[in-house]
Image (spheres, rainbow, N blue to C red):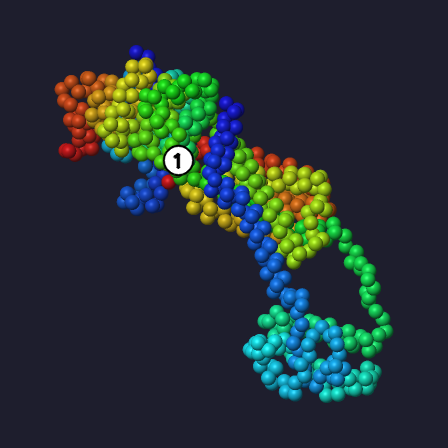
Amino acid sequence: MKSNMITIMKKEFARFFKDKRMVLSTILMPGLLIYVMYTFIGQGLSGLYASGENFVPQVYAVNLPEDYANAEGLPMNFIPVEDETEARAMLTSGAGEEEGGCDLLVVFPENFTEAVNAYETTSGEKAPEVEVYYNSADTDSSTAYSMMLDFLDDYEASMANKFDVNSQEKQYDLASEKDTAGMVFSMMIPMLMMIFLFSGCMAVAPESIAGEKERGTIATLLVTPMKRSHLALGKILSLSVIAILSGLSSFIGTMLSLPNMMGGMEDVSASVYQVSDFLLLLAVILSTVLVIVSIISIISAFAKNVKEATTWVTPVMIVCMLLAVTSMIESLKPDNIFMYLIPLYNSVQCMNGIFSFTADIPGIGVTVASNVVYTILGVGILTKMFNSEKVMFSR
Amino acid sequence: MEEILVAKGLKKTFRISAKQQKLEKTREKIKVAVNNLSFTAYRGEIYGLLGSNGAGKTTTLRMIATLITPDEGDVLVDGVSVVKEPNRVRSKIGFLTSELKLEEFFTPNYLFDFFAQLHGMEREETEERKRELFDKFGISGFAEVKVADMSTGMKQKVSLVISIVHNPDIIIFDEPTNGLDVLTAKVVTDFLLELKSQGKTIIVSTHIFSLIEKVCDRVGIIIDGAMALSGRLSELTEKKNLEDVFFDVYAERAGEAV
């Protein structure tokens, strides 16, 4: 009768994998959607904060100094104006687009060059002031504003060049590709991974347990001589496999699309991780999914139907998401080994350690072991529930 | 005659939820579904439990099938207690009730193999049994059709076959002909008689007098959760037909003329 557990697992797999819609919506779509979504978000964000490469801002300038008016090779196109009113209107309303529009309005003081040359920093007098007007709601105007500030800073620096900072063609950022990837992945992936795993479990567990109760098919199983513990274990293991496949799909989609989302960060690649890192990650993920499936299965067994189960699981998901956020907060990192006994939190911290190359091996050991213990407890509780007529046949 | 199923002093109560209290217009918090119910079925006979809706027939059968546990009393199924060894009882009985549904995604073929495995049957034994039952009930023609795509009659046939996959000696049928068309109902009735001829013991619950009269050897009339009358059908219907016997007992118990 030990094979009954395998029989239940086979049935759960058959139910899932023979249903193309289930496979598509639970395994294929999450990864694909995440890849497409993150890539689009990345492109959208890049487009939002940066104008095209050949962008030359149209800068309307009052009292434009002669040397700017006649200079060549400037990164912007200065258009001298007498009055700032028209340029202000163009900036505010976006009018005049057909003539190139107005990205920026710069008001220089009269005789700017002479005033700057004559100014002594030690005199205590007010320095000549340049006013730069822009429209923050317009991407081109914002870009032009940044360019103008840099341009004026450079001009100011060139007038009193006492020292240079990072002016040579050298690599001043000493972070390696590994460090950059570690920082990005450890910040994002543990949180996303927990959400994906929980979503994967939620997609299958309520349907398999509360759904069977709702449809009356679980009673058909309960009149067979199968041990309730085999039924519970068979359900939890098979649902875990399906949830892991779902989580894996989301994980692959995220790993591939994260560099795109971060605005094409070429340094961010999962290739910096070794096989041993992925094995540790796999151990943490496997044990985490077992815990999540156990929790959702117990809640689903209590519920009368799938709708009720989903409603009851939602607060647990919120708690899971809150715990997932701890990967981003330095002060909430575990400061002793016992903290790895806290379910779900331990998984988040382990994943964070693995991705940031600071894996705490004893901590991971405690996490995996405690998760297995929690799962055994979960199987025990679920077995009791399958044995309880009040739970299984409540209406 | 060998006693094969002995129910002794069965009692089952249920808590009534606030919602049910409203529906049933009662302030009682506990409902006694079955009260001190006893009966004995003998090997190779068909025992009928007759009663109106809500009389306690299904609750009694669910206790025998180990789906629920009696508050008091016990049932010995072939000498095995439903309270102490429910798992052993499950392997001895087949149970069919409208409460037990089949997963609509699967085909009869898959479900038969699945339940045969749960009963620990060998591959060859399963195939032979499947062929026999599928041919008898004409399921072979739709063996690969999903349950979801079947008619009520087809589903009932498959449920019936699944309930006796493991060829049990004791078979419990709760309202087996409910909701069936006349042709399918006849197939089921004939099958009950065939099972009896094979030496199986059958406990059947129903409120249909003709079914009891046609197939049962013994009958127990349940009123308000208690066994009001029990005995051989031939003896009970010596002077009056079963319907008259039932309403006489009902009137006597309920204290009202029907």
In this rendering, the answer to whether A244 lies above or below A181 is above
Residue B58, image x, y percentages? 31, 30
Residue named by callout 1: B104
Task: Name the quadrant of the C terminus of chain B.
Answer: top left
Q: Is residue A359 above or below residue A99?
A: above
| Residue at the (67%, 83%) spot, across then down | A80
Q: Quadrant of residue B211?
A: top left
Crowd rating for badge 1 (residues with CA inside 10 Å; few <14, some 14–19, many 20+): some
Task: Specify the amino acid type for callout 1.
Answer: Glu
Residue A334, given in percent of the width and then of the height, sits at: 68, 48
At 58% from the left and 76% from the top, the residue drawn is A97
Q: Nearer the viewer, residue A394 or A246?
A: A246
Which quadrant of the view contains residue A282? top right
Find residue B256 and report its horizontal and vertical position in percent. Answer: 16, 34
**Residue at 53% across, 35% down:** A238
- Location of the N terminus of chain B (image quadrant): top left
Q: Chain of mark 1?
A: B
What residue is shown at x 66% (from left), y 74% (from top)?
Answer: A57
Does the rendering let one see residue B226?
no
